Image (cartoon, rainbow, N blue to C red):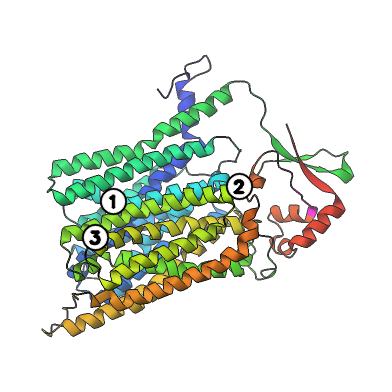
């Protein structure tokens, strides 16, 4: 039982319950629930046909709407900046309001409950609704990374994997609640994420970090639960496409999904019981880092909590002026916002992401139309969308856990795995381009896996190279590459070429009849996407070469006990957040010279 061994003389059920609710692991559990409800943008393929039919859009207009969806979901500079100066609960509340407003207006529009909106207004609705995902990511995911800095790859993989599963979760819930009415799916997307964010609005917060052994084992327990959830979803999706489920059967499957989503609370209770016992029994005080100045040993050493996880919001937004932007610190140190944005490493990563995520996102958003053009039945098209969601989950988990493993074990640069993923995604694009018989099943698996795998890698690389101090803003800047790539590859290329081919086939002369059938509908566009993705893989190899020496070292050393770190007065000024620009002007060599001259060291004491 969870409480086995907990009923000692110092055990109080009320005290323990409060301890759980205030604990780091319950905060992670709340982040899981928020992420599991934050992936509504990935099921656009299910309700996009209702938008196209009810509002009379052609494919390029629909793809334009899809672009604004991606723009809202990934342009999170605003929530990033807000999170720099406010607690996470402010970001979550704003996001909940935007989610409800945006998707509710879309629902009212496609069901005819309001006057038919103009295209620009629909684009605004979906951009606002989708932008709430950026607020959820910034409020919950970024906070979780700061609370578990030594396991950031694993944290990113797990939380992003639940975002990937959310599409399949939504499908089960809306079929149980609303039947086959896909229009009502938009209504579910409007209220569910808002309610969850409001419930856990005060649970998501920065908790001062303390290194603990066995952290990775706990994350593996969460992984096993998520695998069970993904496996159940895959099995039930296959069965549902073979058999005709009634409402009661959909309700049963949805109930099991909800139970599996909430099952991590068991792991949370177990882990918090361990810390509760330690807090209620006399134990040795934990190690803390102290700074000792050799030249002035008469003064008391200054104790600091390690590392700086920004328990207080920044009031100085990373020195947004360009002064010092071209003199960044060493990789792994805290860059200012402008230093990171003007960094060659960030530019390379941004270009590779435009090519990679832009191509896979185009395939995800057009999966319904691709299946229709190749003659697949409606059941199979729904299967493709669900497979993308499941393998999106798998890609996020594999890239998070496996890249962390090879980094720790073999010191392989994390960008190298990004290169491999981009090359692998080219296989899926080629299968779509040539319309291989039954190949869309395999293509949906590859595309879903590669699309999901790129996100944890992108965000982990940003946190490792540019530091965590301004991670809220830099995280969201990295995500901007997605809508840029989507606009170029999806709207300007894929949508344009699809409509061009559809007009050739439109022998009836009907103005609104722009449905395209056959391999030629997407062949040329996905050949272009394949070439662009391959170029992105080559670009990412440049980052692999540039960061090879950085990843050979222990990049998480400063987060562990027993670590000696060189510091100097100039660096201390930078870490206080009062003089970011001037601190950034010292390169690594000058820092070491000053450290040696001033003879200051950091030691660890009990």
At x 77%, y 61%, the residue is 589
Whether residue 537 is visible, yes or no, is yes
The image shows residue 453 at horizontal and vertical percentages of 43, 57
Magenta run includes residue 302:
no
Residue 252 occupies quadrant? top left
Mark 2–mark 1 Cα distance, whole angstroms, equals 34 Å
Magenta run includes residue 565:
yes
- Specify whether 525 is left or right of 374: right
Residue bearing mark 2: 309
Residue bearing mark 1: 168
Residue 413 occupies quadrant? bottom right
Residue bearing mark 3: 46
Whether residue 125 is visible, yes or no, is no
Of labels 2 and 1, earlier in sequence is 1
Residue in front for this viewpoint, 496 or 306? 496
The image shows residue 303 at horizontal and vertical percentages of 73, 39
Mostly what secondary structure, the magenta segment?
loop
Mark 1–mark 3 Cα distance, whole angstroms, equals 11 Å
Q: Are marks 1 and 3 in contact (CB under 8 Å)?
A: no
């Amino acid at each position: 039982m969870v409480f086995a061994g907990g009923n000692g003389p110092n055990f109080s059920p009320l005290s323990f319950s409060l301890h759980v609710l205030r604990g780091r692991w319950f905060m992670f559990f709340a982040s899981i629930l928020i992420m599991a409800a934050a992936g509504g943008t990935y099921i656009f393929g299910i309700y996009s046909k209702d938008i196209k039919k009810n509002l009379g859009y052609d494919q390029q207009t629909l793809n334009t709407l899809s672009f604004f969806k991606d723009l809202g979901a990934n342009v999170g500079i605003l929530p990033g900046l807000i999170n720099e100066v406010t607690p996470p609960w402010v970001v979550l509340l704003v996001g909940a309001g935007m989610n409800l407003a945006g998707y509710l207006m879309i629902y009212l529009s496609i069901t005819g409950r309001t006057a038919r909106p103009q295209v620009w207004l629909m684009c605004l609705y979906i951009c606002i609704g989708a932008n709430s995902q950026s607020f959820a990511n910034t409020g919950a995911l970024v906070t979780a990374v700061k609370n578990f800095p030594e396991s950031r790859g694993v944290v990113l993989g797990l939380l992003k994997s639940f975002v990937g599963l959310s599409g399949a979760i939504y499908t089960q819930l809306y079929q149980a609640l609303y039947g086959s009415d896909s229009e009502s799916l938009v209504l579910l997307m409007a209220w569910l994420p808002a309610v969850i964010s409001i419930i856990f609005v005060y649970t998501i917060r920065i908790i001062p970090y303390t290194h603990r052994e066995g952290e990775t084992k706990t994350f593996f327990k969460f992984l096993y639960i998520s695998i069970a959830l993904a496996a159940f979803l895959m099995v039930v999706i296959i069965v549902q496409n073979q058999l005709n489920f009634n409402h009661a059967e959909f309700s049963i499957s949805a109930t099991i999904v909800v139970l599996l989503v909430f099952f991590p609370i068991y792991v949370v209770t177990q882990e918090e019981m361990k810390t509760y016992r330690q807090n209620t029994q006399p134990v040795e005080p934990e190690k803390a880092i102290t700074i000792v100045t050799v030249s002035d040993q008469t003064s008391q050493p200054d104790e600091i909590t390690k590392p700086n996880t920004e328990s207080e919001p920044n009031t100085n937004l990373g020195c947004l002026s360009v002064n010092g932007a071209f003199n960044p610190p060493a990789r792994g140190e805290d860059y200012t916002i402008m230093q990171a944005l003007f960094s060659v490493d960030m530019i390379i990563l941004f270009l590779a992401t435009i090519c990679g995520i832009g191509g896979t996102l185009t395939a995800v958003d057009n999966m319904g139309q691709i299946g229709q053009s190749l003659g697949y039945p409606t059941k199979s098209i729904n299967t493709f969308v669900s497979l993308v969601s499941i393998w999106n989950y798998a890609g996020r988990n594999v890239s998070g856990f496996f890249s962390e493993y090879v980094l720790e074990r073999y010191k392989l640069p994390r960008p190298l795995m990004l290169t491999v993923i981009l090359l692998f995604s080219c296989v899926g694009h080629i299968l779509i381009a040539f319309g291989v018989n039954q190949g869309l099943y395999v293509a949906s698996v590859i595309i879903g896996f590669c699309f999901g795998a790129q996100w944890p890698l992108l965000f982990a690389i940003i946190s490792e190279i540019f530091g965590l101090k301004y991670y809220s803003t830099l995280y969201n800047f990295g995500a901007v590459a997605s809508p840029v790539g989507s606009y170029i590859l999806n709207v300007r290329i894929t949508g344009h070429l699809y409509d061009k081919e559809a007009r050739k086939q439109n022998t009836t002369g009907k103005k609104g009849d722009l449905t395209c059938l056959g391999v030629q509908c997407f062949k040329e566009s996905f050949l272009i996407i394949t070439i662009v993705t391959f170029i992105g893989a080559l670009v990412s190899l440049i980052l692999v070469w540039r960061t090879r020496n950085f990843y050979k070292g222990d990049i998480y050393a400063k987060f562990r006990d027993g670590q000696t770190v060189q510091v100097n007065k100039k660096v201390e000024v930078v870490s206080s957040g009062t003089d970011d620009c001037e601190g950034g002007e010292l390169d690594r060599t000058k820092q070491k010279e000053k450290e040696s001259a001033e003879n200051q060291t950091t030691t660890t004491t009990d």
